[in-house]
Amino acid sequence: MDWAVIVSDAIRSGIGPVAAVYALAAIGLNLHFGYTGLLNFGQVAFMLVGAYGVAASVSTYDLPLWVGVLIGLGSSVVLALLLGLPTLRLRAEYLAIATIAAGEILRLFYRSSWAEPVTGGVFGLQRFAVEFYDVSPIPRDTYGFWLVRYTSLDLWALAVAWAMVLLAAVVIALLVHSPWGRVIRAIREDEDAVRSLGKSVYAYKMQSLVLGGVIGSMAGMMLAIQNQSVNPDSYDPVVTFFLYTIVVLGGAGRVLGPIVGSILFWAILTFFDSALREAIGAGYVSPSVISAPEVGAVRFALVGLGLVLLMIFRPQGLLGSRKEMLLDAR
Amino acid sequence: MRVHLVLATALAQGDEVPQGPGFLDRALQALVDGIQFGAIIAITAVGLSLIFGTTHLINFAHGELVTIGAVVAFFLNVGAAGPGWHLIPSAAVAIVIGALLGGLIERGMWRPLRKRGVGLINLFIITIGLSLLLRHIVLVFFGTRPQSYREYDIQQALDLGPIGITPRDLIIIALSVLVLLGVAFLLQRTRTGTAIRALSSNPDLAEASGIDVNRVVLIVWVLGGGLAALGGVFYGLTEIITWDMGFRLLLLMFAGIILGGLGSAYGAMVGSFVIGIVAQMSSLWFPIDLQNAWALLALIVVLLIRPQGILGQRERVG
Amino acid sequence: MHADLAGLTADPGVPKPDPLLVVDGVTRAFGGLVAVHVEHLEIQRGAITALIGPNGAGKSTLFNVLSGFDRADAGRWTFDGAPVTGRSAHRLARRGLVRTFQLTKTLGRLSVLENMKLAATGQRGERLVAGLLPPLWLGQERAIEQRADELLERFRLAHMRDEYAGTLSGGQRKLLEMARALMVRPTMVLLDEPMAGVNPALTQSLLSHITDLRDEGMTVCFVEHDMDVVMGISDWVVCMAEGEVVAEGPPRAVAQNPAVIDAYLGRHHDEPGTEYDDG
């Protein structure tokens, strides 16, 4: 068992571009769920719309990348408005189911043969990220420390993604400490009380949904650019469940929660993944019990188990306060 | 439904204009297929609805109870290390195991958590984690390759005028309807069923009149687990057995329950049939890979127009 | 008793000299059961009106309908001369009609001070874009905080200023809700059972706060069961039973009104031969 490989894999994943993308999407989800109390289970739909907005604009319609970005952002605003209309007046559980349904409807449409001319259907789209990598100032080489190494392309993606995470975190920090944020947090506690004080709960929820959704779509764009491809099956409900695990792990309703959560989530997940592969390779675990392709399934099972244990034993996550959690009246 | 049809005709492809006797035949066939699909959704959704009605918990892991039922029956029927029984005893054992599993989850997880006062939203998130866990454990043991049962697999379809249906599917519809009638009988005519209905409509009053809440909830979970397993076997028979079959069915169950009215078992039955029919009949105008999308769209439309569903009480849903 | 209300005949639905709230034919039914059916009711501006009646009389339902938290099946009502039938709760609050809740709705995970600051109206920082730029709202926020602190001082909650509102006792929550309602600078306050669940030692304090509200020019209407409380501070009393207004008038007159006594006891009090009649 080469522990150096296992640990370095974990670190590489924890601070890598994927962790940054998930941190960004989780920041959006944290605004919905952690601060406003919106049980939005369709965050992956925002990522989908942002990713395809960029990919289809460049790949199908030959538009410049920055136009694709604008289209992606625009579509996420439209999605938020469309999604919010039927769902924001619903109770939490209805909202959850409706948003999962909406996410699946979108994914199925993007995946369908009907939409193939624009979205590439089951095959998705490729070759749209060229402009992004062309502007990278990083010379061709590999970079890193110890065994943690990134290519220049990955490093550029990583840097931009984490910069976006930082920007989003600053925006959220400013907002939650403002009077706007106060109304949002009050809505999480008791909507009727907020109404009785003259604030339009629906309008605030919609603003939260739009802002968190736009942040989610930015994450989707970065994910697409990083992978240099989009495929509808990468945007299924499991992604939202991962995001919830990340938000809960870091601490819902805390500015740094999603960032800490994502770094830890990916580090731990990759650690187990890598350790399991090493164990199989070294013969500690026989391939008849778990073969190499099934290691991927084990990581999902672990996330599920982790989420269950978290919610039972430490629902406030790493950065949350237990005292505050006990005051949760919902 | 009217909204859906208007949308459908407006968006239909130019060369598939629906008209003429050929279309009517296909429509009837789709209707029958929809009834069969709906029957399976109904069996699995009833348990989910009863669980919600009595505990207000949305059990996101219900799909996995369906899958586990189908997979256990598969193992007993065709599995490499299994006894190789005929499907019917395999299914019977799978149903029992499903029921036991439901009861075990309630007794071992939900009851202690409820006692601890864990909030409903947190419980809901726990069911999501549980769903992820169970689904991927099944994946590890079952694999990615879709499978079928040994018996009743390939059959000649019976020719009933414009529609064709295999004897197997016909029997499944009949059995499903029987099971649903049985559930209805349980709810209306037995002490337990009355207790379940009482707990669903007014928990405080039910408890005050001496109903043992924990016992009723346990029965609901056992029933739900058994029904899910049965639904799983039926679904595996009519379609195919895969590691995520229950999860794919879960959203349709939600759609059926909400359309019929959250908290009403009969609503779940009615809603599920509607969803099954919408899904199958959508393929008359749209590609098959969009079937589920249309069913889910029906859900969203219902939430817009009449959020309490067909049979639900007009209580505040927001 | 309020000077303006002296000399009014004590009939259900009697018009008031300067009504702030006028209710006409408001009906609300649940299934087949009619919870509220008020033909005509006027609430006098600047007075304290008590709304009494046995359980199930429809008092809270009427409150909910008038304040926009429930819809009426029929009827109209005006507030300060303007028709407000069917307006949503937050719009009514913006017009100056603020209510408190029988089961207090203090925002548990916000501090007591944040609860108060939330209620202030016209906050620039509550808009999304402005919220991002502290210079645009910090000045206003400081002024709001000062006013909040003054109110907290007055309601003797200043020492809990930075604590989570969820840690307050029941009585403290009632005080917080009242103080918070005041931050809105309302024209009319609907208090839904302000004494419910409050320990008797706190009752006097709450009562003096209610009379303070009137003395500062606000109109108060409150639902209450405790007749001593009602007698003590009300300028006018309205009695409801089975959804209808059965009597209204000055406190003492209403207390002696046979219709009111009937409503509470269920039938005429001098009928012979019943279980209550033990000789």
Image: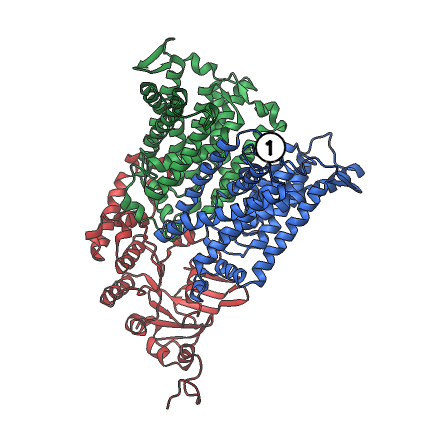
Vertical relation: A132 (above or below) B36:
above
Dot 1 falls on which chain? B
Q: Residue furthest front?
A: B83
Q: Which residue is mark 1?
A: B147
The structure residue drawn at horizontal position 60% and vertical position 57%, both measured from the top left corner, is B184
Q: Residue furthest bottom?
A: C279
Picture coordinates of residue C135 (x, y %)? 28, 35
Question: Color used for chain B?
Answer: blue
Picture coordinates of residue A128 (x, y %)? 50, 17
Q: Is residue B67 left or right of residue C226?
A: right
Q: Along the line of sight, which residue is nearer the eye, B28 or B193?
A: B193
Which chain is the one coloured red?
Answer: C
Q: Along the line of sight, which residue is nearer the eye, B51 or B175?
A: B175
Which SS class for mark 1?
A: loop
Q: Quadrant of residue C196?
A: bottom left
Q: Is residue B118 left or right of residue B18?
A: left
Picture coordinates of residue C141 (x, y %)? 27, 42
Q: Residue furthest top?
A: A140
Tell me how the rendering is colored. by chain
State the count of labels. Answer: 1
Q: Quadrant of the N terminus of chain B?
A: top right
Q: Is residue C92 visible?
A: yes
Q: Quadrant of residue B161?
A: top right
Question: Color used for chain A?
Answer: green
Report the amino acid beneath label 1.
Gln
Crowd rating for badge 1 (residues with CA inside 10 Å; few <14, some 14–19, many 20+)? some
Q: Quadrant of residue A31?
A: top left
Picture coordinates of residue C19 (x, y %)? 40, 65
